[in-house]
Each structure stands twice: as C-alpha cells, then as structure tokens.
Image (spheres, rainbow, N blue to C red):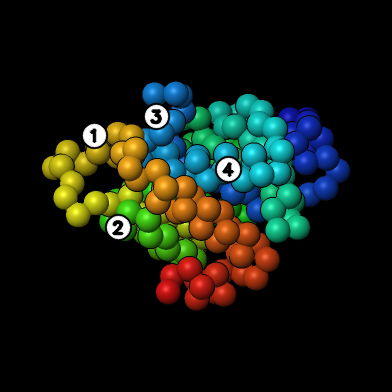
Amino acid sequence: MLWCRMLRTQEIGAKDFTRMIVGLGNPGDRYAQTRHNVGFMVLETLAREEGGRWSNELSCRVCGIQVAGRQVLLVEPMTYMNHSGRAIETLLMALERKPQDLMLVVDDLNLPFGKIRVRERGSAGGHHGLESILTVLNSDEIVRIRMGIGEEQMPEDKASFVLSDFAQEKQAELDDMILRAGNAIKTILRDGVSKTMAIFNA
C-alpha cells in the first residue's frame, strides 16, 4: 500500500519495526494530565528520550524510535478511549500486522496507584479502551502493561474520577510509575515477557 510505504519511509526508514507499542488515552489538552491518559504519558516520555517526532496517520499519532536496541512504532489512537479498537485495527491492516505485534499500555482503576502489572493475555477488566481493542481484533492474546490509578477512597462516579487530573502531591509517584512502565517496555523488548513479569509483578 502507498500509505504503508510512506509511513515506513517517514517514521522508521528502511528498517522494519519489532513491535507497535500502543498507549491508550484521550486526545486534546483537556485530557492530557488525567488519570485515563497515563498510557499516552509513557509513550511521550519514551519519544522524548529518543528525540522521536510524532506524525498523524489514520486516526493515530505515530512515532518511530529505537527502544532497547529495537525499532518500534509508538501509537496513540486519536479516536477517544472507548473507540480505540477502530483506530488500531485500521493501522494494523495498513501495516499488514497481527494483534500479537502489539504491546498495550493502559491505566487500571483496579490496581493501587503507582503499581504496575505486566500480562501476556486476559480480559479487559472493565477498561473500555482495552475492551474496544480486544473486541475489534477478536483476541485477548495481547501483551499489556497495566498502570495503577486506584485510590483507597474513590468517588462513586468512576468515569469522572478517571477523567480528572492527578493531584499535584502525587506527581513524584506518577513520574516514578511512568519511568517503571517505560523500563518494563524495554525489558519486554530485550528479555521477553516472562522475565519482565518476574521482575515487575513481584
């Protein structure tokens, strides 16, 4: 496909990429610092570390960089969280890739704030963005890094909670979680999922 050749030329040159790392979130400044956008935050941190440049392609922001010596494509769906699957399906088809080439980075309301968990497969666990991807791609065999945003005392309105900003006093812990999630991505690429789970899920 012409678009596929253009993307590969602009973002990752002549090299192929090992994985598509997909961070989930909502587009726009209104949501940039919200709990639901930690997936975007991790990818943007990785892109800054490597001097990557973002471009807009097929309802996604994409950025080709090297992580742990591997060429990867960072992807942020721009369809809003609950319709993430549509954007990812379109991109996979354009690049002729399979769901198993994905690695997802998502927030998790069921995990305490600051915790991360690496999983090889599984259900969406109530996360609508993840559910959209698993449903559209008809597969739960997708590696995901879950980032805890839960608090001991949360309001009944969970939708408003995940769409609210992190408290300023949580910034240091948030930065640490983002750093560890990025390190988990690097370890998966370098050493595989099983070893990463043993290190980060302890």
**Image coordinates for residue 47, horizontal then vertical, percent:** 64, 41
The three-letter amino acid code for the residue at tag 1 is Ser
The disc at residue 160 is 1
Q: Of label 2 and label 1, which has the lower sequence position?
A: 2
Q: Which mark is residue 31?
A: 3
From this viewpoint, is residue 77 visible?
yes
Q: Quadrant of residue 164?
A: top left
Q: Dot 4: what SS? A: helix
Picture quarter with the C terminus: bottom left
Q: Are marks 4 and 1 in contact (CB under 8 Å)?
A: no
> Is 33 displayed left or right of 198 in the figure?
left
Real-space Cα separation, disc 3 to disc 1, in angstroms: 12 Å
Q: Amino acid at mark 4?
A: Thr
The answer to which of marks 3 and 1 sits earlier in the sequence is 3
The residues tagged by marks 3 and 4 sit, at their Cα atoms, a distance apart of 17 Å
Q: Residues within 10 Å of mark 3 (few under 14, many from 20)?
A: some
Q: Which mark is residue 84?
A: none
- Label located before the other in sequence (2 or 4): 4
- What residue did someone put label 4 on? 45
